Amino acid sequence: MCTTCGCAGDGATIDAADGHGHGHDHGHAHDHGHDHGHGHDHAHGHADGLLDYGAGPARAHAPGLSQARMVEIERSILSKNDGFAAANRARLARDGVLALNLLAGPGAGKTTLLVDTLRRIDGAMPAAVIEGDQQTSNDAERIRATGVPAVQVNTGKGCHLDAHMVGHAMEHLHLAPGGVLFVENVGNLVCPAAFDLGEHCRVTLLSVTEGEDKPLKYPDIFQNADLVLLTKTDLLPHLEVDMATLEANVTRVAPTARVLRVSTRTGEGMADWLDWLSAQRHALLSGLAAEAEARAALLRAAE
């Protein structure tokens, strides 16, 4: 897992479509040896033919590293990332910009949802997009075709975006006050869940083609979600999917998350998704206005 092996940022580049693509050393690479021998100290459970390498305190396994060492490395990496995330969050708050972190496995429909969303918004609220992929700028080009600015972040061998990458990408975007920044994370059901990007909300997408048990198999990506979108519902007539079971599994893992069924082909759920988005934006702007008024009142009282 990235938080123990430190793969974040290897070969990462940012393409802002302005001729200023460049690479970044994100400081997450660690010089360490891996002893692949089988005499190692790690925790894992044994039960009825199950080898559970997520049973120890690190909830992961890396050859040659003890559980204690993995926990130490994870805390170091995440602590550094959290500092960058706090800076991103402060900048977004200063500018009054709502940031959403979109997470899902490959092919769940993140970019398709974004393209349809941006077309439906059609300038009603300012928007910008940060696209995360290991390689290519295909998704950013699809976003730019809608007229919305997008920055492509290629992570190389890294399997998720981190807050440092997002901070650099934000420098290449004009984030209009009252606007929305969509961050489409790398398609991965595991590692992106561990990294705070400074976002206000997390939106996890799950295609109905992926099966009812995905929330139970990959709980971390769902646990901190504010909203779960069950995508590609237009395919349900052709699938043997029990939607009641799927939704129950999402709720079991993420009891506070709202769950919506959506399809960009039929339009199912898109109005509800846009209403949710508008409500989050309104809540953010109302909260920032209230904070500004409270500060002004304190200043008046001090005069």
Image: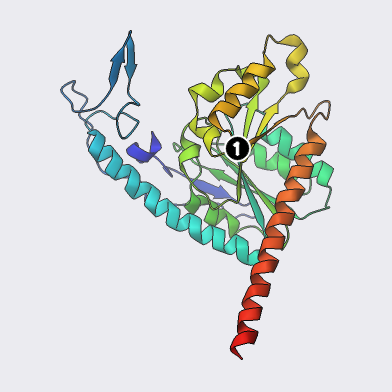
Q: Give the image quarter of residue 57.
A: top left
The x, y position of residue 46, in whole percent, is 28, 15
The x, y position of residue 202, in whole percent, is 60, 42
Q: Give the image quarter of residue 183.
A: top right
Residue for point 66% across, 42% down: 140
Q: Is the residue 185 above or below the residue 149 in the image?
A: above
Q: Left of 31 or right of it: where is 188?
A: right
The x, y position of residue 226, in whole percent, is 62, 41
Residue sitting farthest toward the bottom: 303
**Within-10-Å neighbours for mark 1: few <14, some 14–19, many 20+:** some
Q: Left of 52 or right of it: where is 286?
A: right
Q: Left of 72 or right of it: where is 210?
A: right
Residue sitting farthest toward the left: 39
Secondary element at tag 1: loop
Which residue is denoted by mark 1 in the rendering?
A: 256
**Nearer to the camera, 45 or 78:** 45
